[in-house]
Amino acid sequence: MMEFERLPDDHPALAHSPLLRAARLTLGYALDHGEIGLTARKAFKRSFVHWAVDAFDWPGFGAAEAFRYNKVLNEHEFVPLQVVHFLLLERRLGRHYKGGFRPTAKGRILAASPAGLFAELIPFFILEVDHASYGRFDEHPCGNWEIWLNVLNVKTEDGATEKELYGAFYGEGPDWDNDGWREMATFCQCVIKPLKWAGLVTVQDADGDGPFARMCTKTPLWRAALRLETDEMVQPAMRH
């Protein structure tokens, strides 16, 4: 079993999703300005990319990081925005029209409904998008989201490292500092990163477990938005 719950618009857990925040800001900008300008290749123009970097305040890619080595950024250099652009078009919340990106009627409605926008974008993003397509390697880990989510539901309740999570599915051995780093990278790109971008998990450096170790922990949004078969295996006192 694997289900996404429909939340009320004022549910505080929705604030944990960077991807939802970015989509709302993009739609809001387009509504406020009438459209977002596009390049000849139908990417967002640099002026909006620069605005988005500052407004999104994306974890690990704020303005300070983005412009440390570059004075200008194109859309493909800010991958979260590229993903948001794709999602809004794919879910028909926006369209390209005469050199600009404009919200559709559906997009205008959902721009005012955080929970509705979450329900429209996040399950599709996690379950349907090819997450290897915006990563370093064109490779996919074995498995499926029903298995991954149900196991992670138990393993990340009190936090677990990426290595521990990888080992739960594929066995011990691979790590960031040995020959198995590529397998680890593929797993993290296609499983952990989408959950982090959606706001369902946090990933932070793990103290005292090597220079590359990162700890994954569920956010309140996971507990609010997901209903899984393994919920009964998680101590009820820890569920909210």
Image (cartoon, grey):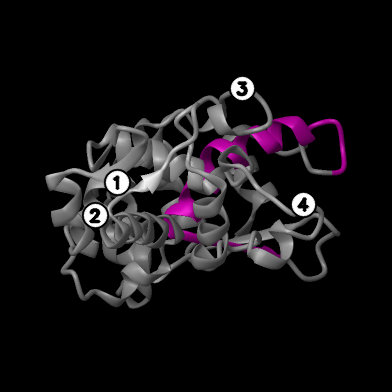
Q: Secondary structure at mark 2?
A: helix
The picture places residue 44, in percent across and down from the top left corner, at 47, 42
Alpha-carbon span between mark 3 and mark 1: 24 Å
Q: Which residue is mark 4?
A: 70
User: Closer to the N terminus: mark 4 or mark 3?
Assistant: 4
Q: Which residue is mark 3?
A: 139
Q: Amino acid at mark 4?
A: Asn
Q: Depth check: give the residue in front, 164 or 9.
A: 9
Q: Amino acid at mark 1?
A: Leu
**Residue at screen point 37% across, 61% down:** 25
Alpha-carbon span between mark 2 and mark 4: 32 Å
Alpha-carbon span between mark 4 and mark 3: 29 Å
Name the disc covering residue 121, or none.
1
Q: Which residue is mark 2?
A: 117
Q: Which residues are magenta?
A: 177-205
**Residue at screen point 52% across, 61% down:** 51
User: Closer to the N terminus: mark 3 or mark 2?
Assistant: 2
Alpha-carbon span between mark 3 and mark 2: 29 Å
Q: Depth check: give the residue in front, 179 or 59.
A: 59
Residue 132 counted in the magenta span: no
